[in-house]
Image (cartoon, grey):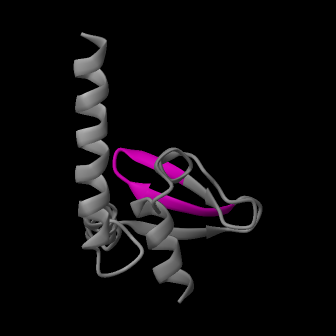
Amino acid sequence: MLEEIICKVMKRMNQMRDFSEKWIIDVSPMAMEVLVENGEYASNYEVRFNGDIGFEIGDPPYTHIVNVKRKQYSCRSWQLKKIPCAHAIAVMHYKG
C-alpha cells in the first residue's frame, strides 16, 4: 500500500511539473483566473478614503478596511491566498 501511495505522489508531481512548464508567465493560470475575477468584483465596490486607517470598501452589507501602508486587509483573503483580493484591487484602482 505504501508503494502505491509513493507511486501516485511521484506521478502527480511529474504531472504538475509538466503543467507548470507550459505556463506563459510566472503566475499560474489558476491564480490569474482568481485575479481577473477579483478585478471584475472590484469594479462594483465603493471606495472611501479614511485618513486614519486607510480605505473603507463598501461591499453591501459589509464594509472592509484596507490599510495599504501596513498591508492589512479586514477580509484577510490576500494574506491567506497571496493573491490580491477584490477590495485591495478596488483601492489600487482608486489610487490610480
The residue at the far top in this view is 1
Give the answer, above or below, for where 14 lies relative to 40: above
Residue 75 seen in render:
no
Residue 76: x %, y % from top left: 53, 45
Q: Is residue 93 left or right of residue 67?
A: left
Q: Residue at x 25, y 41 (%)?
A: 12
- Residue toward you, 54 or 48: 54
- Residue at 28% across, 18% down: 3
Left or right, 54 with respect to 25, comes to right
* Residue 11 location, quadrant: top left
Residue 33, x across and y down, in percent: 25, 65
Looking at the rendering, which quadrant does residue 86 occupy? bottom left
Camera-side residue of 57 and 42: 42
- Rendered image quadrant of residue 51: bottom right
Residue at x 36%, y 80% (from the top left corner): 25
User: Quick check: can you spot residue 76?
Assistant: yes
Residue 55 magenta: yes
- From the viewer's perspective, tell me whether residue 74 is left or right of residue 15: right
Name the quadrant of the N terminus: top left
Does the magenta-highlighted stretch encompass residue 28?
A: no
Answer above or below: position of 93 versus 76: below
Task: Name the residue: 26% across, 71% down.
Answer: 40
* Secondary structure predominantly adopted by residues drawn in magenta: strand
Q: Give the image location of residue 95, x and y in percent.
A: 57, 84
Decide which of 29, 88 is in the foreground and name it: 29
Q: Number of marks in the image?
A: 0
Q: Position of residue 85 (x, y in %)?
A: 44, 59
**Where does the magenta region start and end?**
54-64
Q: Is residue 40 above or below residue 82?
A: below
Q: Residue furthest front?
A: 3
